[in-house]
Image (cartoon, rainbow, N blue to C red):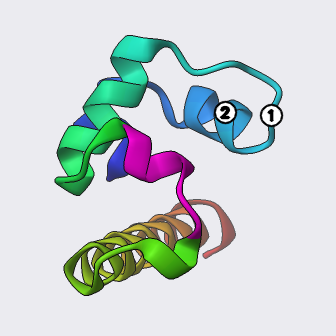
Amino acid sequence: MLAEKMGISTNFLADIETEKSWISSLTLTKLANILEIEVYDLFRSKKTLKDETKETIKSMMNDISVTIEHSLKQITIKYLN
């Protein structure tokens, strides 16, 4: 999960994504390192991202989707069955 890799909570990551919290330079650097890009690449247009960066992002989004789906199944089993 991205939040785990960054060393932050999922709630804080959600707050960053929804602009409720600001990201520190340290956390921004961690994100860039996880994505294997330079920090300035995070501010570039999507059109300028390298293909391998796009693939890394797609892979991470897939991982996040799988994790969310698994969590929802576990919640359903635990609380609704």
Left or right side of 28 for 37: left
Determine the main secondary structure of the stretch shown in magenta: helix
Task: Specify few, some or many for label 1: CA neighbours under 10 Å numbering under 14, 14-19, or 20 or more.
Answer: few
Identified by mark 2, the residue type is Ile
Q: Nearer the viewer, residue 8 or 36?
A: 36
Q: Is residue 48 left or right of residue 29?
A: right
Residue 77 image offset from top left, x and y in percent:
51, 72
**Mark drawn on residue 37:** none
Q: Residue at 35% x, 37% y: name it.
A: 39
**Element at label 1:** loop
Instruction: Identify the residue under disc 2.
Output: 16
Residue 19 position, x and y percent, is 80, 34
Q: Is residue 35 left or right of residue 16?
A: left
The one nearer the camera, 14 or 81, is 14
Tell me which amino acid carries mark 1.
Glu
Q: Secondary structure at mark 2?
A: helix
Q: State the extent of the magenta-drawn residues as a range.
A: 40-45
Q: Dividing the picture into quarters, in which one does residue 29 lie?
A: top left
Q: Residue, x 73% and y 20% (percent of image)?
A: 21
Say above or below: 67 vs 34: below
Q: Position of residue 7 (x, y in %)?
A: 30, 24
Q: Does residue 62 lie above or below 25 as drawn?
A: below
Labels 2 & 1 near each other (Cβ < 8 A)? yes
Q: Quadrant of residue 63?
A: bottom left
Q: Position of residue 48 (x, y in %)?
A: 45, 74
Q: Is residue 26 in view?
A: yes
* In the displayed structure image, the side of residue 65 where residue 58 appears, left or right: left
Q: Is residue 17 magenta?
A: no
> Which residue is drawn at the image coordinates 42% and 67% (left, top)?
64
Residue that carries the numbered disc 1 in the rendered image: 19
The quadrant in which residue 33 appears is top left
> What is the C-alpha distance between the residues marked 2 and 1?
5 Å
